[in-house]
């Protein structure tokens, strides 16, 4: 079971009390789970223990400070070339220490408490972000806090503003569209979907999950899916298949093939960005919007093309004359 990193941080030997010269080069912050973290005033080397944190570092343009990440960190592709410290739930402490990080970034959604405690005892600063983010605003706030830790407050604010603007533009474009009822498939067997109190549901103000659940990742039976009959089925866990391939598979499976969405070809495949509280979530949401409401984007293109033709028409007339 995944554990929250909630234990108090133990101050390590390299932050020994009473060492005034050393203390002047440190600062104290409180992370997202209330831990007191003593860290270097200037952060030059970072190790990230979760894919969303690695992606955030790159989105902020701070990849040069990334000393290492985990085996699961694959976005952007360049992240796979960084030194790895093992898996997110069982990283090698020796590998982390060898990278000499000023700061380790962890998250409650995937990392375990014992990893943070062990690193803290070794005198390594660990800042834990809240992995149970329920809104996009919380996600953006977390991005800004991480940026500030790394001395990039301006970049964090700029990135948050840019991502929020893209979502606002998307919602404005789709404001008059009918609500689409969507089944998000995070995992197929057993069938796991999203609840309404997740950052994904919050981002989709123009679409809603067919499942009303207080759980973030509720399990669902296929019989219940048939009863609810979603408008679209969205695979959002990085299954590696194209939408066409996924649709063919579903049409060959009992129960799945009886769904109206499968019969109508309303199947969308998103990569794992759709379930990560990271900047790439906005890309996934935009991709889904285009798949579910293609007419909204086609109309804009048609209007743009019409205006272009109207502007060019007088020129053409003069050329004929």
Image (spheres, grey):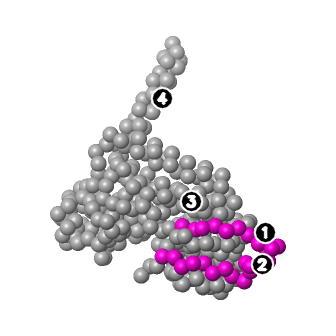
In 3D space, how far apart are the residues under numbered discs 2 and 4 (Cα atoms)? 71 Å
Q: What whole-number distance in Å separates the C-alpha atoms at marks 2 and 3?
A: 33 Å
* Residues drawn in magenta: 4-32
Near mark 1 (Cα within 10 A), the count class, few <14, some 14-19 or many ≥20, is few
Q: Would you name the residue on which mark 1 appears?
A: 24
Is tag 3's residue or tag 4's residue first in the polypeptide sequence? 3
Closer to us: mark 2 or mark 4?
A: 2
Which quadrant of the structure image shows residue 265?
bottom left
Asked if the residue under mark 4 is in contact with the one under mark 1, i.e. CB atoms within 8 Å, the reply is no
Residue density around tag 4, few if under 14, some if 14–19, many if 20 or more, within 10 Å: few
Q: Position of residue 241 (x, y in %)?
A: 39, 67
- Percent across and percent down for residue 210 are 26, 59
Do the numbered discs 2 and 3 sit on residues whose CB atoms are within 8 Å?
Answer: no
Seen from the viewer's position, the closer of residues 191 and 291 is 191
x 49%, y 58%: residue? 138
Which residue lies under the disc numbered 4? 308
Residue denoted by label 3? 143
**Numbered marks: total:** 4
Q: Which residue does the image show at 48% across and 68% down from the upper left?
A: 131
Q: CA distance from mark 1 to mark 4?
A: 62 Å
- Element at label 4: helix
Hey, which quadrant is residue 268 in on the image? bottom left
Q: Is residue 119 above or below residue 23?
A: below
Image location (x, y in percent) of residue 81: 63, 72
**Tag in front: 1 or 3:** 1
Residue furthest to the front: 18
On the rendered structure, is 192 left or right of 46? left
């Amino acid at each position: 079971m995944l554990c929250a990193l909630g234990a108090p941080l133990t101050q390590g030997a390299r932050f020994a009390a009473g060492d005034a010269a050393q203390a002047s080069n440190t600062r104290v912050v409180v992370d997202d789970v209330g831990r007191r973290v003593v860290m270097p005033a200037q952060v030059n080397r970072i190790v990230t223990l979760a894919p969303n944190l690695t992606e955030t570092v790159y989105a902020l343009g701070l990849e040069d400070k990334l000393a290492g990440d985990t085996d699961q960190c694959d976005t952007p592709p360049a992240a796979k070339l960084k030194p790895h410290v093992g898996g997110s739930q069982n990283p090698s402490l020796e590998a982390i220490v060898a990278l000499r990080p000023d700061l380790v970034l962890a998250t409650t959604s995937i990392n375990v408490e014992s990893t943070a405690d062990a690193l803290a005892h070794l005198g390594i600063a660990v800042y834990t972000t809240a992995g149970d983010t329920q809104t996009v605003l919380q996600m953006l706030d977390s991005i800004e806090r991480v940026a500030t830790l790394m001395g990039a407050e301006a970049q964090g604010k700029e990135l948050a503003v840019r991502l929020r603007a893209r979502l606002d533009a998307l919602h404005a474009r789709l404001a008059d569209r009918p609500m689409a009822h969507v089944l998000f498939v995070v995992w197929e067997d057993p069938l796991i979907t999203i609840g309404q109190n997740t950052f994904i549901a919050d981002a989709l103000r123009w679409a809603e999950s067919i499942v009303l659940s207080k759980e973030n990742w509720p399990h669902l039976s296929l019989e219940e899916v048939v009863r609810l009959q979603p408008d679209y089925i969205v695979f959002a866990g990085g299954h590696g298949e194209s939408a066409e391939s996924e649709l063919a598979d579903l049409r060959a499976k009992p129960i799945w093939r009886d769904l109206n969405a499968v019969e109508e070809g309303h199947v969308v495949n998103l990569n794992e960005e759709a379930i990560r509280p990271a900047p790439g979530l906005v890309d996934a949401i935009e991709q889904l919007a285009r798949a579910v409401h293609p007419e909204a984007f086609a109309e804009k293109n048609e209007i743009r093309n019409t205006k272009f033709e109207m502007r060019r028409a007088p020129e053409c007339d003069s050329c004929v004359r």
